Amino acid sequence: MLRRGHGHRRPEGGWAAECESFPKCYSCKPSSSAPASDEGSPSDKVPVATTVNTPAVNFASGDKIASARAMAKGRAFIVAPWGEDVKTKPFMVASDCSGAVASLLTKAAFAQFGSTDKLRTSVKAHLQSEEEVHELLAKAATFKGEPAMVVYTLADKKLDKLMKDEAIKLNVPVVNVLEGLLAAMERRFDMKRSTSISTDDYSKALDDYNECGVYCMSDSAGSCATAATRAALKQFRGACVDKLTVCPNVRTLEEIQMIVFEAFSNESIVTFSFANPGMGRFTRMQCERLKVDYADIYQPLVIAMERYLDYPLVGVPGGMDLKELEISKKSWRIEQV
């Protein structure tokens, strides 16, 4: 029997602990995991992220299978002629901060459909008011003659709800790429998201000190998962997270299982970005079984883009930004018939 904190260690390294700029004297209190639904795990169906007239399922712990089933009814399986490339459509990026994280995720997700040379985005940074939300969506509704997809990060729940409600009225596809992660952190840290630390938060943190962390895993370098996690952590400065454990180039189910067990042993959150939907589903499955709080950074946006672009995703690390290869460096061989 494996003891907590021991056992499943990656022997050759490769995981990196990255420091955060948050004071280590603050702490978080491990919250109890969301009670399991009698209806099963949300990973039994593949729901669709926020698109026109479709409520959001963010692939985070605590989602119910009923909402996933409702979402799956609207899931379209996209096909396209073999020789046809994705058609360029407009994207708008919006954020209550700089928009860097939403821009990074938009570019990474678009690569699953075509070369990012075709991607064209406009950025609205420092979105802070209801008036700015209305103005943004009005522009998106008629952007270059057709509705533009809005990819955004908003921590304020009221502005987020307004964005989604008004988008439905205007038939504008939108997706908040941080909402699932923020909700998971609220449960895990047992505190509300905030841009400042109150005296109550500080006292509570000192009284209930119990260090926890975040494991960020990816099938590539991990830049999307870590950037999103860092952005979300800014809303929880009362938490004790001063390091991220970054697990890049994860390509096997065994490694996913090992990472989730490590997160369970250290009472941590798991965030991940996998191009392959099956890898993401397996990660959610393992997290649900061990009651580990988690958030899928990538698939909700990819699924929303699939419907918006009306084009199938390729589902491989790095997407369709193809690089030149040298045959001499490949391990090809000739065998006798």
Image: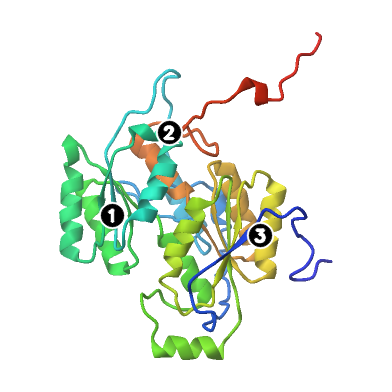
Along the viewing direction, whichever of 2 and 210 lies nearer the viewer: 210
**Which of the numbered marks, if any, corresponds to residue 260?**
3
Q: Which sits earlier in the primary sequence, circle 1 or circle 3? A: 1
Quarter of the image with the C terminus in it: top right
Q: Is residue 18 above or below residue 21?
A: above
**Which of the numbered marks, if any, corresponds to residue 94?**
1
Q: Which sits earlier in the primary sequence, circle 2 or circle 3? A: 2
Along the viewing direction, whichever of 272 and 118 lies nearer the viewer: 118
Q: Quadrant of residue 80?
A: top left
Badge nearest the viewer, 1 or 3 = 1
Q: Quadrant of residue 82?
A: top left
Identify the residue shown where x is 45% and y is 58%. 228
Q: CA distance from mark 1 to mark 2?
A: 21 Å
Q: Is residue 94 visible?
A: yes
Identify the residue shown where x is 35% and y is 66%. 155
Identify the residue shown where x is 29% and y is 35%. 89
Residue 169 image point, x, y percent: 20, 51
Q: Which residue is mark 2?
A: 113
Q: Secondary structure at mark 2?
A: loop
Q: CA distance from mark 1 to mark 3?
A: 32 Å
Identify the residue shown where x is 38% and y is 41%. 305
Residue 320 image point, x, y percent: 47, 32
Q: Which sits earlier in the primary sequence, circle 1 or circle 2? A: 1
Label 1, residues with CA under 10 Å away: few <14, some 14-19, many ≥20: many
Q: Is residue 128 left or right of residue 187?
A: left
